[in-house]
Amino acid sequence: MEFNASEHPHTRYNPLKGEWILVSPHRMKRPWDGQNEYESSNMGLEFDPTNPLCPGVIRSNGIVCNNLTPEYKSTYVFTNDFPALLEDTPSPPQSDDPLFRFEGVQGTCRVMCFHPKSNITIALMSINDIVNIITRWIEQLEELGKTYVWVQIFENKGSMMGCSNHHPHCQIWACSFLPNEPRIKDIKQREYLEKYNRPMLMDYVKRELKAKVRIVTENIHWVVLVPFWAIWPYETMVLPKRHIKRMNEISENEKTTLASVMKLLVIKYDNMFKTSFPYSMGWHDYLLYQ
């Protein structure tokens, strides 16, 4: 019997994390009677006076949503009223116990509203709106990266993904430690560079662009693909076609083309599932001041 990657179970190596994953393509043939999420014609109100992320609305802690310009017209960033990280916290007592260990952590959590309208998503925004989002991301990375080891930008869209507010927004967490995922990816990419004298993801992008098997969409500067080692259903990765280590290294033209490819990707998700597709999105940069 000859091996067929589309038919036979096998494992695949994730070079970014140094781990093997199980792939069972034959299970795609099994009967399925799971839940379907149907398109809703109600995208909600453009302005909801009860939504604390709308311009001018009182937030949960009683502070006007935008202290400087309550009626914000583009993006807006503020410190999360219920943060997972705090800037000033005491350190736990030191312990030599090998099983129960503590380390202190400091950080800050911010919320970034993408747009003043509540009934809009990235798929429905203009390219200029998305460029404004990218520009603000870069500003936040540069500001917070001067103080904290890691800055994580992420968006959970839709209640299915645990999002508690439908207004278009993301979160920005900055912390004094390097989380496991970027720490491991940093180690594996350093090892690859030392061994082959080439950036891992540049080699990977070239191979994928040549094979054209897992490409979802691309433009002159960016490519969206399904990783060879994908583990999540409909997982995709957005990668630059040139060597870019940090988001603040992209040009103005690359901002525009990144906005374009992001918009097209979420449109494809929405069209495939005939709904405003829920997702989790995160950006991984090289450590800003390393």
Image: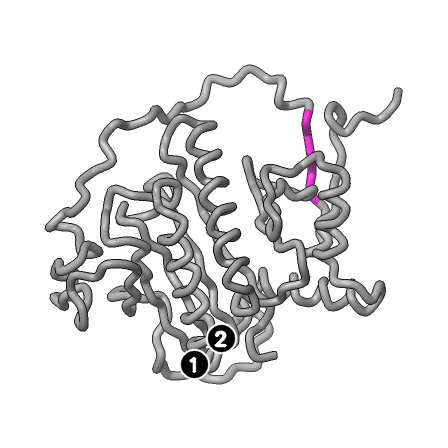
Q: Crowding near pointer 1: few (<14 within 10 Å), some, many (20+)?
A: few
Type of amino acid at the residue the image marks with label 2: Phe
Q: Is residue 93 above or below residue 229?
A: below
Q: Give the image quarter of residue 158.
A: top left
Residue 232, given in percent of the width and then of the height, sits at 56, 40
Does the segment drawn in magenta span residue 17? Answer: no
Direction from residue 77 to residue 9 in the image, left or right: right
Which residue lies at the image location 76% right of the left edge and 41% below the top edge?
210
* Relative depth, front residue between 78 and 126: 126
| Circle 1 SS class | loop
Q: Mark 1 highlights which residue?
A: 92
Which residue lies at the image location 37% right of the left edge and 72% below the top edge?
108
Q: CA distance from mark 2 to mark 1?
A: 6 Å
Which residue lies at the image location 72% right of the left edge and 43% below the top edge?
209
Type of amino acid at the residue the image marks with label 1: Pro
Direction from residue 176 to residue 205 in the image, left or right: right
The quadrant in which the N terminus is found is: top right
Q: Crowding near pointer 2: few (<14 within 10 Å), some, many (20+)?
A: few
**Magenta part of the chain:** 21-25
Direction from residue 71 to residue 257 in the image, left or right: right
